[in-house]
């Protein structure tokens, strides 16, 4: 029975075998000796932790024994741990006799910082993968944390020849361009499976979902990433359509299939159960993504793995429905998305998944579970929170990465040592060093709305309005005796100009001008000049008063006399104005009273000035 399952699985996988499996690579730069100096390609191993977005410099060592690294180096009394102050050790190992991952584990145990595996035949580079779970004890796989790379046989032979000639071989492993980083958002996919009975790999996937959920939701909620889960399925060849294997492992009449979880048709769940649950997972994502809450998929995937495991016979639709409802996800929409799994029809969701398995552009076919794709480039390395987050962070355009990428466990702050070689103002605690995931940038900053301009390396100067509020705009400023002078002016320029009474560059210094010595002021015959910081004092001989505007002395008495004359004239003018006003007022009052009296008298007797208008009234 198991043979039949394996045979069908082989046929299903063979359908994809004619596609393109892309080997992910990074650069290797040999810096010495001159005979092999240059840049070479190497293939990233699918285990350990590649330093995505970064580099690693070291010295290559080829062991005198245990060349293939299949045994522990402790048996040979050898250690490759670098001493303080020396470069890390890159251990060169020959291919063959044991698993790649075991070689890496033995190298790591011996203190190597990275492992280079030299191919044993002339061929294109391949991907070093982890061993199958049923043929190897994989307990050490999750413990590998050094990067690994497969190099060509010709390069391996050249390195070994240089070492045997007594040359030190130094090189730099470079992963800075292993993940494209075009903009401020990272698109990534996780090709996974709801099956939890496939051994160590299934356990690793579930553990990853739980550990990475928090980081994934932070990135998704902040709009930093666009995440999409995918599920691999195969179709059953027509020749096997009516076989028991296809009927138990496929839905929709052989269109979408998955291997039997236990590889035994007589017990447990069937492959078609896995396909249905994968479809449900994919539809949950579609529903929550339409509501703008794509991060809720992580809640469903982790809750399902905990509440509905196969080993407790809860890997059912009923259990999955309870998880969906508990998370407030529209169950009706999920079922509408899933469609008919029994009919002889295409399923749009699963068909789209099969089409996505085929590689496009820089991404090869997806044939391995699990597979992570970051910015259309397949991730290689351990499926572990820190390693995956490092790969995602490498996908951001420099200086746009979120703060989660700049934590101590993800990033080395290069601004902490010698300020990254950038400009800084220690007094004002202002620096042009901008820490990024990939390293650092020297860019003049913007502080409290004030933009600094310059090259970022040797100088930065505040510019624009309000610039004097930040370190006085980088200009000279000094206080003496309670007086403060500044060479900064709050305008839209970035010029530092010494204030009146000073001369200098306005940046480093402004020196006091001695107006007395240079005869710039207080030069009248009666004047006596005394220089002060930033200004001067001028006095006159007794009885005289100094006018700064005219730079002259005048008589103090004359000034007083002139002042009293002016006051007297002013008083006389006011008095005259008052008398004139009073006369006009009296005249108007009198004229008004005369008019009123004449009007009253006219009612009783004719006045000389009034014409006789008497009329005769006759009665009839």
Image (cartoon, rainbow, N blue to C red):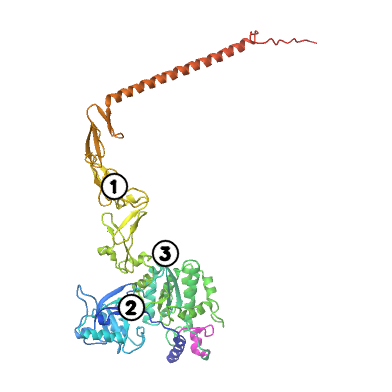
Q: Is residue 91 left or right of residue 220?
A: left
Residue 265 seen in render: no
Image location (x, y in percent) of residue 241: 52, 89
- Occupied quadrant, residue 206: bottom left
Q: Quadrant of the C terminus?
A: top right
Q: Where 306 sits versus 577, above or below? A: below
In the rendered structure, find residue 498 and report the number of the disc placed on it: 1
Image location (x, y in percent) of residue 399: 36, 65
Q: Nearer the viewer, residue 458 or 428?
A: 458
Residue holding disc 2: 27
Q: Residues within 10 Å of mark 2 (few under 14, many from 20)?
A: many
Which residue is drawn at the image coordinates 35% and 66% (left, top)? 404
Q: Where 311 sits versus 530, above or below? A: below
For mark 3, give the secondary structure: loop
Image location (x, y in percent) of residue 96: 30, 89
Image location (x, y in percent) of residue 168: 22, 80
Real-space CA distance between mark 2 and mark 3, rounded to the nearest whole angstrom: 32 Å
Give the magenta part as a residue range.
240-258
Q: Nearer the viewer, mark 1 or mark 3?
A: 1
Q: Residues within 10 Å of mark 1 (few under 14, many from 20)?
A: many
């Amino acid at each position: 029975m198991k043979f039949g399952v394996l045979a069908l699985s082989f046929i299903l996988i063979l359908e994809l075998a004619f596609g393109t499996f892309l080997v992910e690579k990074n650069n290797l730069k040999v810096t010495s000796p001159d005979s092999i100096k240059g840049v070479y390609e190497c293939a990233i191993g699918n285990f350990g932790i590649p330093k995505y977005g970064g580099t690693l410099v070291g010295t290559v060592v080829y062991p005198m024994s245990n060349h293939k690294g299949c045994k522990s180096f402790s048996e040979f009394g050898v250690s490759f741990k670098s001493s303080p102050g020396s470069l890390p050790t890159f251990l060169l190992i020959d291919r063959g006799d044991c698993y790649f991952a075991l070689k890496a584990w033995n190298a790591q145990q011996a203190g190597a910082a990275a492992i280079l595996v030299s191919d044993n035949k002339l061929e294109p580079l391949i991907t070093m993968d982890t061993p199958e779970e049923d043929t190897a004890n994989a307990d050490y796989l999750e413990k590998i944390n050094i990067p690994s790379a497969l190099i060509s046989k010709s390069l391996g032979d050249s390195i070994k020849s240089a070492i045997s000639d007594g040359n030190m071989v130094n090189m730099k492993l470079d992963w800075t361009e292993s993940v494209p980083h075009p903009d401020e958002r990272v698109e990534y996919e996780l090709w996974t499976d709801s099956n939890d009975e496939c051994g160590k790999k299934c356990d690793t996937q579930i553990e990853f979902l739980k550990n990475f959920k928090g980081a994934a939701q932070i990135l998704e909620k902040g709009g930093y990433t666009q995440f999409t889960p995918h599920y691999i399925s195969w179709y059953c060849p027509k020749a096997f359509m009516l076989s028991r294997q296809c009927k138990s492992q496929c839905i929709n009449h052989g269109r979408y299939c998955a291997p039997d979880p236990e590889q035994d048709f007589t017990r447990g769940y069937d492959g078609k159960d896995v396909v249905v649950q994968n479809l449900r997972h994919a539809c949950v994502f579609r529903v929550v993504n339409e509501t703008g809450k794509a991060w809720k998929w992580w809640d469903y995937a982790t809750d399902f793995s905990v509440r509905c495991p196969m080993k407790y016979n809860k890997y059912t639709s009923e259990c999955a429905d309870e998880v969906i409802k508990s998370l407030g996800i529209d169950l009706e929409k999920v079922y509408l998305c899933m469609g008919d799994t029994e009919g002889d029809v295409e399923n749009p969701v699963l068909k789209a998944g099969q089409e996505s398995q085929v590689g496009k552009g820089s991404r090869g076919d997806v044939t391995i579970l699990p597979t992570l794709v970051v910015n259309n480039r397949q991730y290689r390395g351990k499926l572990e929170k820190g390693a995956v987050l490092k790969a995602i962070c490498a996908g951001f355009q420099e200086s746009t990465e979120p703060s989660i990428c700049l934590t101590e466990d993800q990033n080395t702050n290069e601004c902490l040592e010698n300020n990254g070689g950038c400009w800084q103002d220690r007094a004002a605690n202002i620096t042009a060093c901008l820490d990024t995931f990939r390293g650092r940038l020297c860019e003049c900053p913007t502080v409290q709305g004030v933009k600094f301009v310059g090259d970022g390396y040797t100088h930065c100067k505040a510019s624009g309005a309000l610039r004097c509020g930040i370190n006085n705009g980088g200009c000279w400023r000094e206080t003496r005796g309670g007086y403060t002078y500044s060479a900064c002016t709050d305008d839209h320029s970035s010029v530092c100009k010494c204030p009146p009474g000073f001369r200098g560059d306005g940046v480093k210094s402004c020196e006091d001008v001695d107006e007395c010595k240079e005869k710039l002021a207080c030069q009248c015959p009666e004047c006596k000049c005394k220089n002060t910081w930033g200004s001067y004092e001028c006095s006159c001989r007794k009885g005289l008063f100094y006018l700064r505007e005219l730079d002259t002395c005048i008589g103090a008495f004359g000034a007083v006399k002139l002042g009293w004359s002016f006051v007297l004239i002013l008083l006389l003018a006011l008095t005259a104005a008052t008398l004139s006003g009073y006369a006009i007022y009296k005249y108007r009052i009198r004229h008004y009273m005369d008019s009123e009296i004449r009007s009253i008298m006219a009612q009783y007797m004719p006045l000389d000035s009034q014409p006789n208008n008497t009329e005769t009234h006759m009665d009839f």
